[in-house]
Amino acid sequence: MNLRGAPGNFIYRNLANITSILGVLPLAALFLNYGYRFVVPLIIFNNIMDDLDGVLAARLNIRSRFGADLDNICDAVTHVIFALVVGAHFGSLLIAASAIAAGSIILRVATRLDPKATEGTGSPTNELMRHILFTLLLAEQFNFEHEYILVAVFLIHSVSMLASFPMPALIRKRAKSAVAIGLVNVALVTAWFAPISAPLVAMAFLATYMHSFVLGWIGWRKS
């Protein structure tokens, strides 16, 4: 990409940062009347934009500490909003569980702002978003009560996000190349538009999550 002049150069150097911010702004729709109906597409959109900013930073060689911190802050804002909106929609026990998860999201992201923070431990906050997405998609497809499932999802992730052991088997963590990252997002979009695929996609993500969590916990207990 060749953007000439100071304005063009500024845009080029901040393409990843602009992408991070654009992943947050549409969440304003959640605060409209009946905004909850946008939760599923916005989770998918935010996941795509969150991955895209990292790909752009790597491919264009425009990584920076500011960009990494901005990405973490955007994750904190968006994922706390998603958690609380889902909790508030159902109320009761779920709103308490979502508040606990929101606290864990903030704590996890805050630790990532420390340049000396240990990378590669616990589960990313995005993994919680994907599990919320799968629960909502499957509940709509099979018409089952899912409030208590969401409570379990929030509480389990509240622990795994702050875990001090690695969870390397997660699908998104194993996706390193731009193509692999793109395929992860294609799987999410496919699960939404082709409900018949949703159980298989959800099973893949859930199985690798539980596998990582159990093995990580066992390894931590033995250490």
Image (tube, helix red, strand yellow):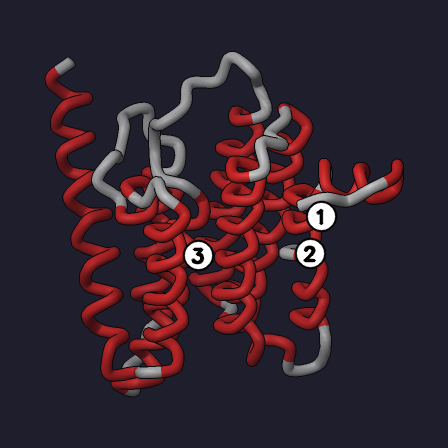
**Can residue 151 be seen in this snapshot?**
no
**Can residue 223 be seen in this snapshot?**
yes
16 and 152: which one is in front? Answer: 16
As displayed, is residue 164 above or below residue 101? Answer: above
Find disc 3 in the rendering and name its residue. 129
Amino acid at circle 1: Ile
Query: Which quarter of the figure has residue 11?
Result: top right
Amino acid at circle 2: Leu
Q: Position of residue 120 (x, y in %)?
A: 35, 27
43 and 35: which one is in front? Answer: 43
Find disc 1 in the rendering and name its residue. 18
Please tell me which residue is depicted at 42% across the width and 18% down the height of the picture. 118
Distance CA(mark 3)–CA(mark 1): 21 Å
131 and 200: which one is in front? Answer: 200
Q: Secondary structure at mark 3?
A: helix
Amino acid at circle 3: Met
Q: Position of residue 131 (x, y in %)?
A: 35, 59
Please tell me which residue is depicted at 18% across the width and 30% down the height of the picture. 217
142 and 58: which one is in front? Answer: 58
